[in-house]
Image: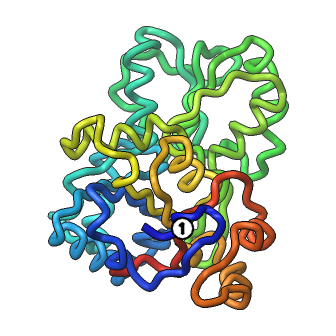
Amino acid sequence: MPNSSGLSIDLISGIREFSDQLDLIICDLWGVMHDGISLHPSAEIAIQKARAAGIKTVFLSNAPRPRFHVRDHLISMGLSEDLTDFVVTSGGLARDEVRANFRGKKLYHLGPEGDRNTVEGLPVVEVNHPDEADVILATDLDYSDVKKHRNWLKIAAEKQTPLLCANPDRIVHVGDKLYQCAGAVADLYEEIGGEVRWFGKPTAYALQSCLKECGLPADTPKNRILMVGDSLQTDMAGALAAGYKGLFIAGGIHRMEFPELERQAEDSRVSVVQFRKIFGAGKAVPHAVMQQLSW
C-alpha cells in the first residue's frame, strides 16, 4: 500500500497498483463515480475490475436519501445494476436513528420538497416550523443563504432540539457549479449552541457499517480496507476515524488545486507537508492520490 512511511503521499495511476492488498473498497459516489449529471466511465470500470479481482465494494454516500433511492438513481444514470447491490447512505442511517429514538415525536424536515422520500414512512408527527419540533431532520437547506438559517433555527437551538444531519457534506459539485449542503447548516446550528447528530462520513460508524452491508466480518484487518473519495473533510477524515486507508480523488471538489499538486510532485510523490500547504488539510491526509478513479 502506498505511503507506508507516512511522510509522503504517492500519486498513482490506478488502484490496480495495490489491489492485492485489499479486501474492501468503500467508494464515495458524488465526485468519484459521477459529477451529479454524468457517470465517470473510468470509475465504473475500476469498480468492475476490483470485483473481478475478488475485492468487495460498497458505495457510501452522504446523500440524504434512502438506499433504494440512490440505487435507482445510479441505475438511471447508466451504472451497471450488478454494481449497486451494496449501498449505504447517510439518509438511511438518519432514518434508522429516527425509528430507534424518536417514535411518535414531532419532527421538522429541514430541506426541499424533493427530499420528501427521506421522511416518508417514518413513525413521527411532522410539524411545519422548527420551533415546534422535538427533532429536526436536515437533508438540505431551507434558504439558499446559509446565514438566513440563524434566526430560523435560533429557538430550536436554545431548546436543544437535536438536529439530525442526514447530509454532512458542506459543498458539492453539480456539473461545474458548487452548491452548499445540509452540513453547512449543521455547522451553523452548532455555532449557535444547538445539538447536532451527524450521519454518514466522516463518522467511523458510517464506514464500519459498510462491512456489515457486504457481509465482511467486523474484525476484517483495517489496513485491507480502502476509502475512496474526493473530500478531505468527509471521506479522508472518515478513513482516519475508522483507521482505514484513504485514496483521495483530487479531480472532484478540489479539482482547482490538482495542477499545483502535480507541479510539486517529485517521482510521483508529494510530501505530507506540501500536500497540507496545497489543500489546507489537517490530520486527514490520504495514503494515495489520483485525479480520477481508475483501475
Q: Could you say which quadrant of the image residue 142 lies in?
A: top right
**Can residue 109 be seen by looking at this rendering?**
no
Task: Judge by depth and name the residue closer to the eye, 108 or 288.
Answer: 288
In the rendered image, the residue lying farthest to the top is 104
Q: Position of residue 105 (x, y in %)?
A: 49, 10
Image quadrant where one finds the C terminus? bottom left
Image color mode: rainbow
Task: Say which quarter of the image contains residue 134.
Answer: top right
Placement of 53 over or under 215, stated as above or below:
below
Residue at the spot x=65%, y=66% of the render?
A: 7
Identified at 30% across, 70% down, the residue is 19
Residue 194's spot in the image, x, y percent?
75, 23
- Which residue in the protein does label 1 denote? 3
Q: Is residue 291 left or right of residue 17?
A: right
Task: Find residue 135 and report its horizontal and vertical position in percent.
Answer: 58, 19
Q: In the image, is 248 to the left or to the right of 38?
A: right
Nearer to me, 183 or 8: 8
